Each structure stands twice: as structure tokens, then as C-alpha cells.
Amino acid sequence: MSLMRSLVLLIVFIILALYVFFFESGGKDKENSLPPVKKALDIIPEDIGEIVLRRDDLYVLLENIDSKWRIKRPFEADANNDMVHDLLSIFDCGIVRVIDEKPSNLKTFGLTSPRYLFAVKDKKGRVRTLLVGDDAPGNLSCYSKLEGSSQVFLLGVRYRQEFDRALAQFARPQGKR
């Protein structure tokens, strides 16, 4: 009986080893085979000179002066560098998916009068602007596009939350929160 039990365990072990060898090996190859994340704005935080963030009547202009961020509008003050970095790091998340390559009507997505405008100006003077429109059904993502491009894509709701947090932080003087 003991010999039979040992043989059964040996067979189970061999089957498991073969499964791991054929189906679970190549972890690094699998990582490399994943498609790269497509970013809404492919930015390098150190290369950004200005940031504009607008929602309705709230408008914030941040300027990078000697690697220190300053609020220039709606008032002048030092900005929290970590919070600006957090705002820029949202773009590491990438887009959810492309919705329409050439939409016939941007109003369908809330992009004729977008809820948010986020623009970055790099130190070479190039400006890239992200427009964020209505929420997609389910409120887990929102319709977006880059200014100058016709492609409409979905961004996760975290973008909108981060924009709201940044506006709350940077659009009011310290004592008014």
C-alpha cells in the first residue's frame, strides 16, 4: 500500500512539474510580450515648464522655475512640488482604450465643451493639450482626446479625481481651503 501511494504521488508530482514547465515558465518572456502602455500624454516631468489646468471657472497656471513649482494663476505662491509630481504621475497610467479614430460628432463625448483642459508646455515651448469630456457609461472612465488629434479614447476616472484634487489644492490660497 505504501508503494502504491508513493507511485501515485510521484505521478502527480511529474504532472505538476510538466504543467509548470510548459505553461508557467517564461515569466520574463511573458512580461516582454505585453503591449506597451499607451499614454494619454507621454511626458517627462523634468522637461515640463508650465502646466495649465482648467475646469469650468477654475483655472490654474503652474510654472517650473529652477526645478521649483510656482502657482502663477489665480494667485502667485509656491506650489507643493510633491503634489505637482503626483499630478504629472497620473499620466503613467495610460489610456483604457481607443473609442473612435475619427468621430463624426465630438458633442457625443462631451468634447466640444470639455469638462477639463490639461495642457503642458515643455521647456522647448511645445504645448500638448488633453481635453476630458463626459463620463462613459458606468462612471469608471471618461472620454478624452488630444487637441489637434481626432482620436477619442477612454481615460480611467482616476484622471478626473486627480484633476479635481489639484484644482482644490492649487486654485485657492493656503488659508482659504
Image (spheres, rainbow, N blue to C red):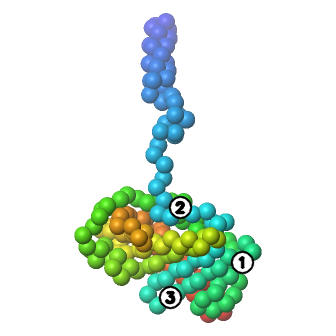
Q: Under tag 3, what secondary structure? A: strand
Q: Residue at x 39, y 67 (%)?
A: 149
The outermost residue toward the right is 66
Q: Earlier in the sequence, mark 2 or mark 1?
A: 2
- Report, in whole angstroms, how far the alpha carbon at label 2 lies from the one at label 3: 25 Å
The span from disc 2 to disc 1 (Cα, nearest Å) is 21 Å
Locate residue 68: give its quadrant. Answer: bottom right
Q: Residue at x 52, y 39 (%)?
A: 32
Q: Position of residue 50 (x, y in %)?
A: 61, 77
Mark 3 lies on residue: 58
Looking at the image, is mark 2 or mark 3 nearer the viewer?
2
Q: Is residue 73 left or right of residue 16?
A: right
Q: For the residues carrying marks 1 and 3, which lies nearer the camera in this image? A: 1
Kind of residue indicated by mark 2: Asp
Rendered location of residue 80, percent (x, y): 68, 77
The kind of residue on which mark 3 rests is Leu
**Residue in front for this viewpoint, 165 or 68:** 68
Please tell me which residue is depicted at 47% across the width and 39% down the height of the picture.
33
Counting every numbered tag in the picture gives 3
Q: Secondary structure at mark 1?
A: strand
Q: How many residues crowd around disc 2 within 10 Å: few (fewer than 14), some, or many (20 or more)? A: few
Mark 2, residue position: 42
Number of the label disc, if any, that sits on residue 65: 1
- Height in image: 59 above or below 3? below
Q: Are marks 1 and 3 in contact (CB under 8 Å)?
A: no
Circle 2 SS class:
loop
For residue 126, the mark is: none
